[in-house]
Image (cartoon, grey):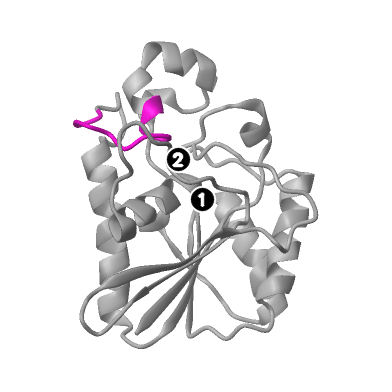
Amino acid sequence: MTEFTLIRHGETVENLAGIIQGHFNSELNDIGRGQAEAVAKRLKNESFDLFYSSDLRRAAATAEAISRANGMTFQPMTELREWHLGALERQNADRMRELYPEVMAAFKHAPQKEVIVPEGENYSEFHARICNVMETLAEQHPGKRLLIVTHGGVLREVFRMVVGAALPQNALPLLTNTGYTKVRKNDLGEWQLCVWNDSSHLTETREQKAF
């Protein structure tokens, strides 16, 4: 059994303002830094064999807080980055819903066809990247416990990989900054969702957009 504990990064100014981040290297805000410390405290007494993080600053800063608490050094990985949204990045989400409705809808509902992102990563490319990194890490580290800090969009692709797509009329599950998720892959090659978006370590929780 290979076990993955996945943590979403802490809150950013862009999260609150409804600005699309993607690969934009945004920073944690004050609340986000507090969230990072809270999840670090929660994880302090858990044991992990390996520690990975997206190399984008908002994830790396969250991982740094965890590292200070548990003494583990994390390995940054570009493969764990958020969906690369090209021309949509650093733009207002409400405006982008008007211009690129299919791209924006893919964060809430399972896409029914290919989603093309101008100057960015098409949906099928993004989904394949996340599936590949999860399968690769599971293959490289059988029987190990892995800690991963990443992004909302990435977590939704992990959900789709493990559980399958939600029905078209249903919204994908909620996400919270520094929410705690756990999935496993057993010796038969079966993936299982164990915990989704547990935010009990936070005194204040806010659902945020994946982008």
Residue at x 32%, y 65% (from the top left corner):
134
- Residue occupied by mark 2: 23
**Is 94 left, or right, of 13 in this rendering?**
left
Residue at x 77%, y 47% (from the top left corner):
31
Q: Residues within 10 Å of mark 2 (few under 14, many from 20)?
A: many
Question: Magenta stretch mostly in which secondary structure?
Answer: loop
Residue 103, quarter of picture: top left
Q: Position of residue 137 (x, y in %)?
A: 32, 73
Residue at x 33%, y 83% (from the top left corner):
141
Q: Amino acid at mark 1?
A: Leu
**Is 123 left, or right, of 83 in this rendering?**
left
Q: CA distance from mark 2 to mark 1?
A: 7 Å
Answer above or below: position of 44 versus 92: below
Q: Which residue is nearer to you in this view: 74 or 170?
A: 170
The N terminus appears in which quarter of the rendering? bottom left
Q: Amino acid at mark 2?
A: His
**Is 76 left, or right, of 68 in this rendering?**
left
- Residue occupied by mark 1: 56
Q: Say how many tags the image has.
A: 2
Residue segment shown in magenta: 104-115
